[in-house]
Structure formats: structure tokens, C-alpha cells
Image: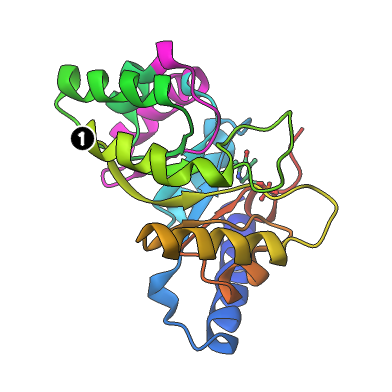
């Protein structure tokens, strides 16, 4: 099992390196986040053994149940929240995660600012943009980025970039390009974009953080 995990990790890393080369980018400028949602500790441990240290989850409760034990086994693991966050889970999220990719509304900014005061922690955050304007998806409207960024910064959040999940089953590249443009306009340097199916395009268009589940763990049950 550790061999399988290592082979998949090596494959993804090789594809990342190739995409960086094509884009004349430095591989160390792109961080691989292993998205371990729905995966149990037995599926995660082989990837840790293979050297992966940065993981992402989409639910606070699931992450709380799984990660403290895994983190106790292996120091130096970084945890990212990539799923929608309810304001009433802000305290738990700030306590557990090193980065939060889904900051998308004024009420959540307020809740996260309070959570920072309570916990004394200040995770790096991204504003999530609903880049395809899909009603069922989280994220703010592209036009709301400047106002939300100003509010978040005034509240003391450490906003480092923008994150998006483009619409499924369409060419993702135009959406990645749009997110990169929005980030540049906002003066933000970090771009969380690209998943198993499209991370090479995301790297070509400037992704600094790619979020990979299936390509590392296999299909989710
Ligand atoms: C599940 C998920 C991913 C990983 O998707 P894969 O297609 O399995 O690589 C990335 N980002 C978010 C926000 C997710 O929920």
C-alpha cells in the first residue's frame, strides 16, 4: 500500500514538474495539497510514509475526527480547509487548520476574526470566488473581491490569495486565467486552483496551490 501511494505521489510530482517546465516556473513555487476527504487513516498513512506533509479536508468535523491522531504520529503536517465553512464552526476551523481556502462572505469574516482573537491563531486564508457564477457553489462574486478583501484585512485576517473551483465538465483554463487576473488586480500573489483533472492547466496559468484527491488516493467511495 505504501508502494502504491508512493507511485501515485511520484506520478503527480512528475506531472507537476513537467507542467512547471513548460510554463518556465520553479517547481517549488507550486504546493501540492493532498485532499484526503472521505479517506480513512489507513489510506492516509501510506501517503505520509511516502513523504507528503500537506493535506486538505472539506469538512471540519471529519478533519477533527481524523487528524489530531495522525498529527500526533507524525510532526510537521500542515492542514488546509478547502470546503465551505459555516460561521458556527469558525472556532474549530481556526484551531485546527493552517490555511482556510473558503472565505467568501462578510458574516464568515466576522466569525473568523473572533475565532482568531479567542484562539490566538491566525491561519493563512484565501477568498473563494464563485468563478463560474454557479448558484449551488460557494464563493463570492468576482465583483465582490475588492470589498471583501478590504473587510477581511481590516478585521485582521491574513488573506494571501484567491481560490476557485471552476464548473465541472467544461474547459477550466479560461476560469483559471480569470482567477489569476482577479488576484493580480487585488494585489494577491497566491492562487489555489487545479484538481486531479486539470492541475497541469492550472499550473500553466499560475496556480501556487493545487488540490489533488483522486490522483493520489484513487476514486472516492
Ligand atoms: C474534493 C476536492 C478537491 C480534489 O478533487 P479531485 O478531483 O479528487 O482531485 C479539490 N478541491 C476541492 C474544493 C474539493 O472539494
Q: Indicate left or right for 72 with 58 as reference.
A: left
In the rendered image, the vertical position of residue 103 relative to residue 110, given as above or below: below
Residues in magenta, as a range: 61-89
Which residue is at a point 54% across and 87% down the rendered structure image?
Answer: 21
The image quarter containing residue 5 is: bottom right
Which residue is at a point 58% across and 40% down the rendered structure image?
Answer: 141
Q: Indicate left or right for 90 with 170 as reference.
A: left
Magenta-drawn stretch contains 42? no
Q: Is residue 153 visible?
A: yes
Q: Indicate left or right for 214 with 161 as reference.
A: right
| Residue nearest the observer in this picture, 74 or 108 | 108
In the rendered image, the vertical position of residue 213 relative to residue 136, given as above or below: below
Residue 51 % position (x, y): 42, 58
Q: Is mark 1 within 8 Å of ligand 1?
A: no
Q: Is residue 79 visible?
A: no
In the rendered image, the vertical position of residue 21 relative to residue 184, given as above or below: below
| Residue nearest the observer in this picture, 208 or 140 | 140
Residue 139 % position (x, y): 57, 36
Assign a secondary structure to mark 1.
loop
Magenta-drawn stretch contains 85? yes
The C terminus - image quarter: top right
The image quarter containing residue 111 is: top left
Residue designated by label 1: 156
Which residue is at a point 56% across and 35% down the rendered structure image?
Answer: 42
Residue 69 % position (x, y): 36, 27
Quarter of the rendered structure image containing ligand 1: top right
Report the residue that reaches farthest toward the right: 169
Q: How many marks?
A: 1
Residue 137 % position (x, y): 68, 33
Amino acid at each position: 500500500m505504501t508502494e502504491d501511494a508512493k507511485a501515485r505521489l511520484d506520478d503527480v510530482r512528475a506531472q507537476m514538474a513537467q507542467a512547471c517546465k513548460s510554463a518556465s516556473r520553479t517547481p517549488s513555487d507550486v504546493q501540492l495539497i493532498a485532499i484526503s476527504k472521505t479517506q480513512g487513516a489507513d489510506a492516509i498513512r501510506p501517503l505520509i510514509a511516502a513523504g507528503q506533509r500537506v493535506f486538505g479536508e472539506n469538512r471540519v468535523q471529519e478533519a477533527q475526527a481524523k487528524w489530531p491522531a495522525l498529527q500526533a504520529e507524525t510532526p510537521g503536517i500542515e492542514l488546509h480547509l478547502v470546503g465551505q465553512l459555516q460561521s458556527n464552526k469558525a472556532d474549530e476551523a481556526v484551531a485546527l487548520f493552517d490555511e482556510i481556502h473558503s472565505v467568501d462572505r462578510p458574516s464568515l469574516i466576522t466569525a473568523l476574526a473572533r475565532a482568531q482573537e479567542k484562539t490566538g491563531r491566525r491561519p493563512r486564508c484565501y477568498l473563494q470566488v464563485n468563478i463560474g457564477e454557479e448558484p449551488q457553489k460557494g464563493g463570492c462574486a468576482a465583483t465582490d473581491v475588492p470589498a471583501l478583501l478590504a473587510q477581511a484585512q481590516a478585521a485582521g485576517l491574513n488573506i494571501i490569495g484567491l481560490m476557485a473551483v471552476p464548473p465541472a465538465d467544461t474547459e477550466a483554463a479560461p476560469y483559471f486565467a480569470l482567477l489569476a487576473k482577479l488576484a493580480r488586480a487585488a494585489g494577491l500573489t497566491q492562487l489555489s486552483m487545479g484538481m486531479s483533472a486539470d492541475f497541469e492547466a492550472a499550473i500553466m496559468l499560475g496556480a501556487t496551490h493545487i488540490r489533488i484527491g483522486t490522483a493520489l488516493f484513487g476514486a472516492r467511495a
